[in-house]
Image (cartoon, rainbow, N blue to C red):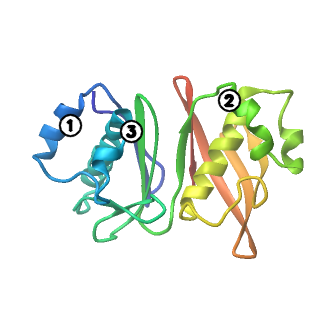
Amino acid sequence: MPVVLTKRISEDEILAIWEITESYEEFEERLHRTPWIDNGQEGTIHPIKRLEYLACRFATEHLTEAINIPFHGVYKDFHGKPHPKGDEFFLSWSHAYPYAVSCIHLKKPVGIDIERPREQLVRASRKYVNDEELSLIEGNNLDQLCLIWAAKEAIFKMNGRSGLSLKDDITIESIENTKKKVLSKANINGSIKKISLDFFRMKENWVVYTR
């Protein structure tokens, strides 16, 4: 099954969610034997991760067709961040099998994350929740913890997957459930930057993306 959701966020931003039902062989045939990732590590990647990466790649191609811009493939940098060949736009990926998400912004860096609420987020919370955020969490509410984690991951990806501590450098200031918005601040290269994110539910997952 290909794209199950295309969401036009603004004139410059669009995302797509792909539900993976294909086999690796089906994806490979669709690629017409062209390389799907340009880091020389295809053989070292877990089979599920291969499917997720391929679904992200095809979701990206779908988005470029939807907004009528060129698509020449995708490469990953040293930190694992995806970039379009030719750098015509900004790109972020996330995946939580069987879903893969791609988000494009035409003018500025973007970050997206898809996460399923799970007990692991409680056990790991001391690694990403700081003191300022404790008032946002009612007990060990999995949805609240998941939104905090996903928002921080999206900001981390927007910044290029390097140089930020999820706990020390990124603070979620509020989660507005009615408006489906997250307000945050991040210490980026010594400067405090306010970052707004939106979110929505996709079955059992939360999808959070920068604006």
Contact, CB < 8 Å: mark 1 with mark 2?
no
167 displayed left or right of 8: right
- Choose top left, top right, bottom left or bottom right for residue 40: bottom left
Secondary structure at numbered mark 3: helix
Residue occupying image coordinates x 55% and y 57%: 157
Q: Which residue is mark 1?
A: 27
Q: Which residue is mark 2?
A: 120
Front residue (pair 54, 59): 54
- Which numbered circle lies on residue 49? 3
Contact, CB < 8 Å: mark 3 with mark 1?
no
- Is residue 11 visible in the rendered image? The answer is no
Front residue (pair 38, 70): 38
Residue occupying image coordinates x 41% and y 65%: 77
Q: Earlier in the sequence, mark 3 or mark 1?
A: 1
124 displayed left or right of 153: right
- Amino acid at dot 2: Gln
